[in-house]
Image: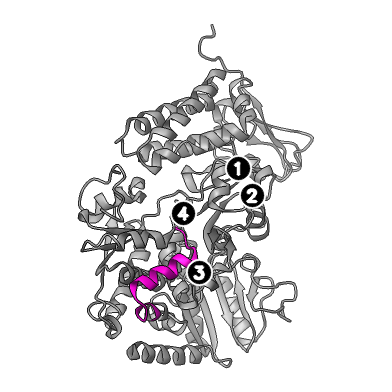
Amino acid sequence: MNKLKALAERSRAEWQALHHPDRARIYLGMASCGRAAGSEEVRKTVLAMVKKHRIAAQLVDVGCIGPCYLEPLMDIAAFGKPRISYGNVNPAKAEMIIEKHLRRGEIVRNLAVGHFADAPCDDLPEFFAQPMLKHQVRIVLKNCGFIDPENIRHYLARDGYSGLQKALELSPDQVIEAIAQSGLRGRGGAGFPTGKKWQICRETGREPRYIICNADEGDPGAFMNRSLLESDPHSVLEGMLIAGYAIGASMGTIYIRAEYPLAIQRLKTAIRQMKENGLLGRRILGSAFHFDLKIKEGAGAFVCGEETALIQSIEGQRGMPRTKPPFPASSGLFGAPTVINNVETLGTVPHILRNGPTWYRQFGTEGNVGTKTFSLVGKVRRTGLIEVPLGTPLRKIIQDIGGGPQKTFKAVQTGGPSGGCLPEELLDTPVTYESLAAAGSIMGSGGLIVMDRDTCVVDVARYFLDFIQRESCGKCTSCRVGTRHMVEILERICKGEGEIDDLNKLESLARTVKSTSLCGLGQTAPNPVLTTLRYFRNEYVEHVVGKYCPALVCRSLIEYYVIPDKCTGCQRCVGVCPTGAISGPRSEPHNLDKTKCIKCRACLEICRFDAIAGNAIAIRTRGES
């Protein structure tokens, strides 16, 4: 324990020196989202500028702070002023920011997107904190964007591993009781009480016992787990140590898909640092607790997110779910008692041990305690990684944090591909496990996909069900065959070949698959179909009876044309049309050659005057002469 205290004191001293008011700091988002947007080139420019002008500034590589729509993000803290955030930075903008902000002491107002302070900033009175962050409560994401994820001293300086220290001062039963009292539920989707799962495992009395971190995040559009592992890996690893101590395990496995190379690299770095500092191995921090960690890279099968399929994969077998019970807590990895928690659940555990269960219960609502991270994506102005208290209404998340859609809102899909599409009238639904289930959706791991008027819900249901059908392991007939038939019906409807009776068949199939599938993949697969039929049935009827797609998405059902009275001849559509289907002189209404149009929607999406529209195509359906 004394060793950890000494490490923490040295780390805090370094942290304070780094954050001295007279020392400038440049924070650069170097998670996958930032790198994909070009932050590595920005980093080279920043280092060159600092060296060239001999600027006394420290560059700090940080993870994802959240507003992915602003990547690459570069923040500057200097001259005793709040940390100012600059968005969509490229090398040229970086040079300007360094020149003006650090050399002249002037905030580049036209590039600034917010600041980090508890009070209004005199230099930016129109901003009160970074807009996307000011409505959030950050517990799990506390360190994301503020520490170098590859520097254990940054983590230690912000009370890292103090949760483990407190756990080791308690008995394993007391640790489990603290987690149970906190009300923490599994953040992987099912919402099972974490303390109860740990208790079941420990009370089996059998050894060995294992702890597994499920980092097999496979939902399209979801990146919560990846971002946390890339931005604050030690928080998840500390949670694994605490869980291992509580259940009596001496080995932990992180199951992570191989498509997350940066997260894997930073996990390996963190594990090496833990070993160097006596936080892994035998007699951790001078206690009788022995624990080690290993990483298992998965091949990317979506079904391996299901806990029993994940176990099969770790054991070297094909990842396929098995019948439960027995549940993994009593018979899991190699038949031994095993606790499987997801990344966010384990990342929350250190905060509870550090601050106490009563502190944690102040967030969220009764039965849905604490916060939840979400990836907010789709047709919304501000996309990215967020964290809010459970019970927060969907409307607040979409409008206040996400800034709302630019066009008319249509639906939000919660819970990833197995979630449900919820309409405008349900936006005041609080985000809890029970309320989302009552609406026909799920919490899932935390994906939120916003859709506007240009989204076809029939096509969305087809897309997600096709994904689920391809990812089905095929073990049970209802999932393997049922989802395939559902996809075939949806494809017919999208092509204008559907019949009104197909809607009843689709609903009947969906309910059968939901009630008879073996695992959670099949049991939740029909949710997109059931919710879109429930809330947007008229849109299905338009496709079947009217042979028309109101959102102008289903190519077989629409043809585009130009509205002369609305067309200003700006030629933006001419510039994006890949086939030269649109023509006409500037400032005069254009023409659209339907024989050349491939219905790519490029003209529709770029037109600012709603001058592109669509007509239904007369389609001869099956059975007609």
Look at the image and say whether residue 172 sits in the magenta stretch: yes
> Where is residue 610 drawn, in percent x and y?
72, 40
Q: In terms of sequence position, does the residue under pointer 4 or pointer 1 come before the other?
A: 4
* Mark 1 in CB contact with mark 3 (< 8 angstroms): no
Say which amino acid is labelled 4. Gly
Q: In terms of sequence position, does the residue under pointer 4 or pointer 3 come before the other?
A: 3
Q: Which residues are magenta?
A: 166-186
Relative side of 158 to 123, left or right: left
Q: Which residue is mark 1?
A: 422
Q: Which residue is mark 2?
A: 429
- What residue occupies the far top of the structure in this picture? 625
Label 3: state its secondary structure: loop
Q: Residue at x 54, y 58 (%)?
A: 368
The quadrant of the image that shows the N terminus is bottom left
Q: Which residue is mark 4?
A: 191
Residue 177 in the image: above or below residue 476: below
> Where is residue 61 drawn, in percent x and y?
45, 76
How much space separates mark 4 and mark 3, taking CA atoms?
A: 19 Å
Label 1: state its secondary structure: strand
How much space separates mark 1 and mark 3, taking CA atoms?
A: 27 Å
How much space separates mark 2 and mark 4, taking CA atoms?
A: 18 Å
Q: In terms of sequence position, does the residue under pointer 2 or pointer 1 come before the other?
A: 1
Say which amino acid is labelled 3. Leu
Locate residue 624: give its quadrant.
top right
- What residue occupies the far right of the structure in this picture? 565
Q: Main secondary structure of the magenta part?
A: helix
Say which amino acid is labelled 1. Leu
Q: Which residue is mark 3?
A: 141
Say which amino acid is labelled 2. Thr
